[in-house]
Amino acid sequence: MAIGVFDSGIGGLSVHHALVERLPQADFLYLGDQANAPYGGRPGEEIVALTRAGCERLFSAGASLVVLACNTASAIALRRLQQTWLPGCRRELGRPVNVLGIIVPTIEAATGLPWEHEAERRGEKVEKLDVIGVFATPATVQSRVYEIEIDKRRQDVAVFSEPCPELARLIERGEPREALQACIRGHAEALRKRIGRYPDRAILGCTHYEIVADLFREALPPGTPLIHQPTAVADALTAYVARHPEYDIGDGGRRAFMTTGEAADQNGLVQTFWGAPVRFEAA
């Protein structure tokens, strides 16, 4: 058995890297749906269907838990899969399986509060707002998941999201640093104009963006804190598996990388981020 990590492409490797560091003894299966990447501009029903297919592939390969290391899949597909598909999948497989997302731990990290917490609505005027900027795919931005869920928990936080339609595709292709830098600077400036100033903190709301986090730091004012999804997800998953021993995550330290696209070594951005070449085998 193993932990499965699913993304539309290479972005989920940022989460996968953090999980491997935190749980080195566990077995991991990574699946990038590169044949259909990116997900950010796709209709919701397609995102649900593609995410379900990825989870099915990982369960069939021996995963007991699947982490959706993709904000778009987590925002659009996770709840549907948990409510309407997973119960039948468990009966069919005859073993405990589950699908987890990355938005819940990100919101917990952004608010400093547990997911179960909801703020009391007192109608009092907030003197100073903490402004969080979210850089994400169009589908994640349209879902308004960060605005809705953070507002439930913190009345002193305002969230502004900036859709980045092409950025994940550029990262997936391994475009030159200059092209990525120009794209990120443009989105940071667009967000500044919408808010009227730069945000106090920022969420990189697509796991692809973590691979070029240094370029976001350059585009934002010096010292602007970034809320790192990989760290938040690794913390949450470590606690989850400790609470749920029914999920067998293996203990052989196995690593496998699969793709729905062509088997190949991944681009230089990935190699630099990972610290070694990464080769995806055909799923």
Image: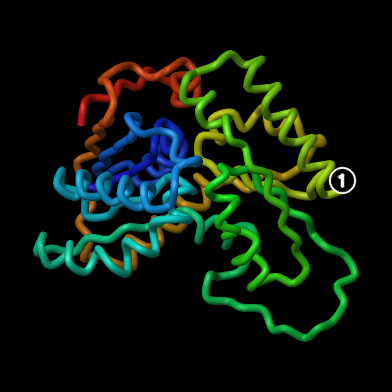
Residue 181 in the image, given as x and y percentages of width and height: 68, 22
Residue 82 picture quarter: bottom left
Colour scheme used in the picture?
Answer: rainbow
Residue 56 in the image, given as x and y percentages of width and height: 21, 49
Residue 74 picture quarter: bottom left
Is 189 located above or below residue 150 in the figure? above
Residue 20 in the image, given as x and y percentages of width and height: 37, 40
Total label count? 1
**Left or right: 134 as drawn, with respect to 193:** left
- Per the image, the residue denoted by label 1 is 197
Mark 1 crowdedness (10 Å alpha carbons): few <14, some 14-19, many ≥20: few
Is 81 located above or below residue 119 in the figure? above
User: What amino acid is labelled 1 in the image?
Assistant: Arg
Q: Is residue 247 visible?
A: yes
Seen at 74% across and 29% down, the residue is: 186
Residue 192 picture quarter: top right
Label 1: which secondary element:
loop
**Left or right: 80 as drawn, with respect to 196:** left
Seen at 21% across and 26% down, the residue is: 282
Quadrant holding the C terminus: top left
**Left or right: 5 as drawn, with respect to 171:** left
Q: Is residue 1 visible?
A: no
Seen at 78% across and 55% down, the residue is: 131
Along the line of sight, the residue nearer the viewer: 37 or 253? 37
Seen at 32% across and 58% down, the residue is: 99
Residue 182 in the image, given as x and y percentages of width and height: 71, 22
